[in-house]
């Protein structure tokens, strides 16, 4: 309890000293900052608000650009995955074709021309051709997707030059 009374006495003494100091300074010191200081403070607040708005706009623009780039990367990865699947299909079809041709050669070497081996080889060849076609389409899709931004940029440059 005595600590509280001592602290209260010290706070009261400090406040008395502050009041005495303010009385010595006079009424001008208590009135507040002058108009020039107020004007400068308002200018700084305005500049600060403008800078915060610019930062907010730049952050929004940056976030949207990052999202667009991520979408492009995801799309490119999807195309590459499709191309990879099609190339694996080509490899499997070519392996089947090689095996069928080897069996057909072995049958011809023995002098036995078996129709089911010929059919099997033709089916393997057809599958290889289909797989190669699908791989070509996937590869062309990747190439076109890579070239599209360049075409768009060239078209934008051409329209900008025509407008100038």
Image: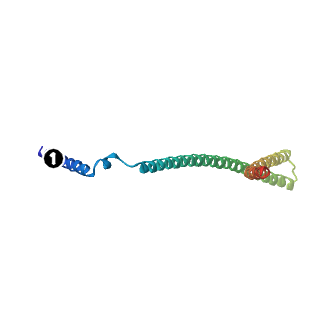
On the image, the x and y values in percent for residue 147 come to 75, 52
Label 1 belongs to which residue? Answer: 9
Residue 92 visible, this angle: no
- For the point 23% across and 47% down, the residue is 19
Residue 91 position, x and y percent, is 74, 52
Q: Where residue 34 sits: x, y (%)?
A: 39, 49
Classify 10 Å Cα crowding around label 1: few (below 14), some (14-19), many (20 and above). few
Q: Left or right: 63 with respect to 35? A: right
Task: Tell me where residue 95 appears, x and y as whole percent.
Answer: 75, 53
One can see residue 30 in this view:
yes
Name the residue rendered at 80%, 52% in the picture: 103
Quadrant position of the N terminus in the picture: top left
User: How are the colours assigned in the image?
Assistant: rainbow
Does residue 38 appear left or right of residue 57 in this picture?
left
Q: Is residue 15 left or right of residue 138?
A: left
Determine the residue located farthest toward the bottom in the rendered image: 109
Which element type, helix, strand or loop, lies under badge 1?
A: helix
Of residue 142 and residue 99, the one placed in the foreground of this image is: 142
Residue placed most toward the observer, 84 or 10: 10
Residue at the extreme front: 27
Q: Is residue 40 left or right of residue 108?
A: left
Name the residue furthest top. 1
């Amino acid at each position: 309890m005595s600590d509280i009374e001592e602290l209260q006495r010290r706070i009261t003494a400090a406040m008395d000293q502050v009041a005495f100091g303010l009385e010595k300074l006079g009424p001008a010191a208590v009135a507040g900052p002058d108009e020039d200081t107020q004007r400068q403070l308002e200018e700084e607040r305005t500049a600060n608000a403008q800078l915060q708005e610019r930062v907010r706009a730049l952050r929004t623009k940056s976030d949207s650009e990052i999202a667009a780039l991520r979408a492009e990367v995801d799309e490119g990865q999807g195309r590459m995955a499709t191309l990879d699947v099609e190339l694996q299909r080509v490899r499997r079809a070519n392996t089947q074709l090689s095996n069928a041709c080897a069996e057909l050669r072995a049958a011809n070497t023995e002098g036995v021309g078996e129709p089911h081996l010929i059919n099997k080889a033709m089916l393997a060849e057809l599958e290889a051709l289909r797989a190669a076609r699908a791989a070509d389409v996937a590869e062309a899709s990747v190439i076109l997707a890579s070239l599209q931004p360049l075409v768009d940029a060239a078209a934008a440059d051409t329209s900008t030059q025509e407008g100038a």
